Image (cartoon, helix red, strand yellow):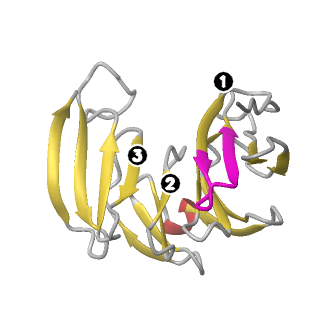
Amino acid sequence: VLSLMGHRLPVTSVAYSPDGKRILSASCGPNAGTPGEVKEWDAVRGGEILALRGHKGGVNQVAYSPDGKHIVCASYDDNLKVWDADTGVVVLALKTNDLGWSKGPWTSVAYSPDGKRICGEGCVVWDADTGAVVRTLERPRAMGWVSFSPDGKRLAIASASNNGTPIDLRQPGSLTVSDADTGRQLLSLQGST
């Protein structure tokens, strides 16, 4: 059993590398302006490999690219960063202000199974190599989470609340499934409990 100690703030996300040899952990403070921490750990021996610093807000979710070469982080600082998993150098900063609107805190991020696209919170899809926006989808009204289907053809997008902000976790959420290439909504599942 390993106990990976080293975060000063509550841990909000963990992810295994595709080869199972490394583990990512992210932390987030009590307010949006507290810089989060991202750490990469040796999954066998438990030692810290990298500490990724550079987000100005808490980090909500982390994910490895399917080949394990990159790490993407969703943060409260209104951007997502892609890091080299070996060196800890930022290789891309994916910002919504380039789109003409501010998303605010990012709660989720996912790589497509082929590693060619990154989706943030189900509303923006970027090219994972260039950082160019491939597609924008309807933004979730509240906190959203995203997952690509195993074949990369669909996006499942969950929202904590379907009545806007402030978030009321007592209210039913929603789940939509969209075509990952066209953005067309295929399913809408309201009232998930």
**What residue does disc 1 label?**
30
Q: CA distance from mark 1 to mark 3?
A: 20 Å
Label 2 Cα crowd, 10 Å radius (few <14 / some 14-19 / many 20+): many
Where residue 129 sits in the image (x, y, percent)?
59, 79
Disc number at residue 145? Answer: 3
The answer to whether one can see residue 146 in this image is yes
Q: Residue at x 32, y 51 (%)?
A: 157
Specify the farthest residue to the bottom. 130
Where is residue 113, by image quadrant?
A: bottom left
The answer to whether residue 167 is above or below residue 14 is above
The answer to whether one can see residue 74 in this image is no
Q: Which residues are magenta?
A: 15-26
The answer to whether residue 184 is above or below residue 57 is below
Q: Residue at x 24, y 45 (%)?
A: 175
Viewer-proximal residue, 165 or 191? 191
Where residue 133 sits in the image (x, y, percent)?
48, 74
**What residue does disc 2 label?**
109
The answer to whether mark 1 and mark 2 are in CB contact below 8 A is no
The amino acid sitting under disc 2 is Val
The amino acid sitting under disc 3 is Trp
Local SS, label 3: strand
Instruction: Tell me which numbered mark, 1 or 3, is placed earlier along the sequence.
Output: 1
Where residue 185 sits in the image (x, y, percent)?
19, 61
Q: Residue at x 43, y 63 (%)?
A: 124
Where residue 128 sits in the image (x, y, percent)?
55, 74
Q: Residue at x 75, y 39 (%)?
A: 35
The amino acid sitting under disc 1 is Pro
